[in-house]
């Protein structure tokens, strides 16, 4: 029998980035939100470890590694070694989350793989151990397990859920070509040699979130990686201006980009913004609500 796990894309409502640490990572104060764009991962019992990927029309299959470098297989091997057992199983991943888009698609798949292997192998790994293994694989992966809306500190791996009773409407516009996360962080270092050691606080964003007011949340959105991402891809600035002219409350680069996400005031607002962006020639325009759950088993 197959085990199927769904994992969501993330956006950063607030991404405060401090001066690079000695270990090469940047201290963050961030607020993540999981939104309704998903990858689905299924796992069947097998004698060896295999992976097949299927991608949505808006994804180039060549962008997804199909060998041992795929983070799904890395996650399976890490959990197997933690449990002292062989890594076995036949994975199939169906990708809808833009690749190298600043939406943590690989992190979502890694979180899904941890949950699926734990189930198929009957391990009953504790939440604390799963979160620690997730952090070892990547800074965003603990959040992909937790989902909802959460604050992330440290290098983003220390995650605490926050109060969010909103149902926020988002329009996401991925780019045809992804951006490398380390390259955007390096560009941040060049552009912001004076970056403070302590990253910009997420407190104002959290207050806006608790208000439930889309206009207030729109004003509070903040991303310190937006400037370097736009400097590397100037067309992202034009895209933000366009989406705002088409009715969005605010556009912002998602994480390290190049996906741009637009906060809208309602379902109708999101439909209108999406239609305006599509009419202006953007082939791929996705609409989603957030928050949604983290990596979870499908019945
Ligand atoms: C920028 C963010 C914002 O949520 O997301 P994406 O836009 O990539 O989705 C994250 O910080 C990405 O997290 P993730 O993609 O898991 O990063 P990791 O695999 O841990 O690290 C990849 C590389 O990114 C840089 N990195 C990552 C996290 C961090 N706090 N500081 C960094 O400088 C380092 O160069 C590191 O070698
Ligand atoms: N399962 C996977 N899905 C997507 N990308 C993967 C996967 N496994 C490894 N990768 C590699 O990770 C890189 C970053 O992918 P992704 O997590 O989608 O982006 P981001 O870090 O911008 O959120 C990709 O360019 C790809 O080479």
Image (tube, helix red, strand yellow):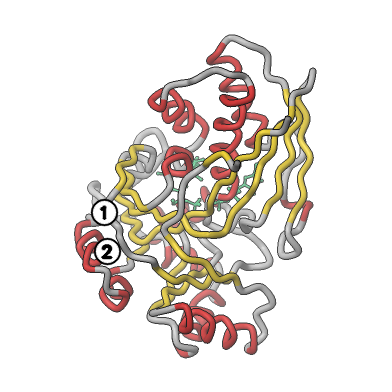
Q: CA distance from mark 2 to mark 1?
A: 8 Å
The residue drawn where x is 72% and y is 21% is 88
Look at the numbered disc 1 and give the secondary structure of its residue. loop
Whether the residue carrying mark 1 lies under 8 Å from ligand 1 is answered with no
Question: Which quadrant, please, contains the N terminus?
Answer: top right
Look at the numbered disc 2 and give the secondary structure of its residue. helix
Q: Quadrant of residue 42?
A: top right
The residue drawn where x is 63% and y is 68% is 175
- Nearer to us in this view, 51 or 226: 51
The x, y position of residue 85, in whole percent, is: 63, 11
The x, y position of residue 68, in whole percent, is: 72, 31
* Residue at far top of view: 84
**Dot 2 and dot 1 residues touching (CB under 8 Å):** yes
* Vertical order, 94 against 269 (above or below): above
- Nearer to us in this view, 21 or 3: 3
The residue drawn where x is 56% and y is 24% is 118
- Return the mark for residue 99: none
Seen in the image, is 11 located left or right of residue 152? Answer: right
* Vertical order, 193 against 296 (above or below): below
Around disc 2, counting alpha carbons within 10 Å, would you say few (fewer than 14), some (14 to 19), or many (20 or more)? many
Residue of label 1: 163
Residue of label 2: 209
The residue drawn where x is 46% and y is 49% is 293
Please report whichever mark, 2 or 1, sits nearer to the chain's N-terminal start: 1
């Amino acid at each position: 029998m197959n085990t199927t796990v769904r994992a969501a894309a993330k956006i950063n409502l607030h991404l405060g980035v401090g001066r690079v640490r000695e270990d090469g990572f940047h201290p963050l104060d961030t607020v993540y939100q999981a939104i309704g764009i998903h990858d689905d991962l299924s796992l069947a019992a097998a004698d060896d470890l295999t992976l097949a990927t299927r991608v949505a029309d808006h994804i180039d299959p060549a962008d997804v590694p199909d060998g041992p470098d795929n983070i799904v297989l890395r996650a399976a091997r890490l959990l197997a070694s933690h449990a002292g057992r062989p890594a076995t199983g036949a994975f199939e991943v169906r990708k809808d989350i833009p690749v190298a888009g600043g939406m943590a698609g690989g992190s979502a798949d890694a979180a899904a793989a941890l949950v699926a292997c734990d189930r198929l192998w009957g391990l009953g790994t504790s939440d604390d151990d799963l979160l620690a293994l997730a952090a070892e694989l990547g800074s965003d992966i603990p959040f992909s397990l937790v989902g909802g809306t959460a604050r992330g500190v440290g290098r983003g791996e220390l995650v605490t859920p926050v109060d969010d009773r909103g149902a926020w409407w988002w329009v996401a516009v991925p780019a045809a070509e992804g951006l490398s996360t380390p390259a955007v962080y390096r560009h941040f270092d060049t552009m912001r040699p004076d970056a403070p050691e302590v990253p910009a606080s997420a407190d104002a964003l959290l207050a806006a979130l608790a208000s439930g007011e889309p206009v207030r949340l729109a004003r509070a959105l903040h991303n310190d990686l937006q400037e370097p991402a736009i400097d590397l891809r100037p067309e992202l600035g034009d895209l933000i201006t366009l989406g705002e002219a088409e009715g969005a409350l605010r556009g912002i680069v998602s994480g390290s980009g190049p996906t741009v996400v637009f906060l809208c005031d309602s379902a109708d607002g999101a439909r209108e913004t999406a239609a305006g962006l599509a009419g202006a020639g953007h082939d791929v325009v996705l609409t989603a609500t957030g928050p949604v759950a983290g990596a979870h088993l499908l019945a």
